Amino acid sequence: MIYSLAMKRKLEGSIIIPANVSPWDHELKTAQALAQHGYVVEFVAVSSSHKVKTADVTIGGELYEMKSPLASKLSAIERNLKRAYRQSTLILAG
């Protein structure tokens, strides 16, 4: 099955940021772009458990990890995406 964010689209987009969450600038910009296209993006609080990785946002009930790779080496970008995969199998890269 081909999975697409289009399957999670709502008529009105919004961004939900819990009080205990401080998104990075690139995460907020990505969330704003998604909300402008009708998605409801909710940021996820960081787990308080030791060494537990959590995804950045939920969209339509699915957990997504956001990455904005800036490295100049392909190996560094690959490493960052592998780390992202540990947090969620659904990755938004931009």
Image: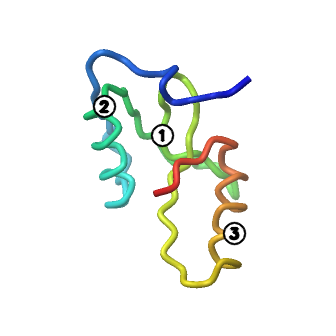
Quadrant hosting residue 43: top left
**Residue at x-position 46% and y-position 57%:** 94
Q: CA distance from mark 3 to mark 1?
A: 21 Å
Numbered disc total: 3
Coordinates of residue 33 in the picture (x, y in percent): 30, 43
**According to the image, label 2 marks what residue?**
37
Of badges 3 and 1, the one in the foreground is 3
Going by the numbered disc 1, the residue's amino acid type is Val
- SS category of the residue bearing label 2: loop
Look at the numbered discs 3 and 1 and tell me whether their residues touch, using CB distance below 8 Å: no
| Residue 38 drawn above or below residue 76 | above
Q: What is the three-letter code of the residue carrying label 3?
A: Glu
Taking depth in this image into account, of 76 and 84 the one nearest to the observer is 76
Structural crowding at the residue carrying mark 3, measured as other residues with C-alpha within 10 Å and reported as few (<14), some (14–19) or many (≥20): few
Q: Earlier in the sequence, mark 1 or mark 2?
A: 2
| Image location (x, y in percent) of residue 73 | 62, 83
- Residue 72 location, x and y as percent? 55, 84
Q: Is residue 3 left or right of residue 35?
A: right
Q: Is residue 81 above or below residue 2?
A: below
For this orientation, the residue located farthest to the bottom is 72
Task: Tell me the residue that label 1 is attached to.
Answer: 57
**Crowd tier of the residue under label 1, counting other residues whose Cα lies within 10 Å: few below 14, some 14–19, many 20 or above:** many
Between residue 93 and residue 21, name the one nearer to us.
93
The residue that label 3 is drawn on is 78
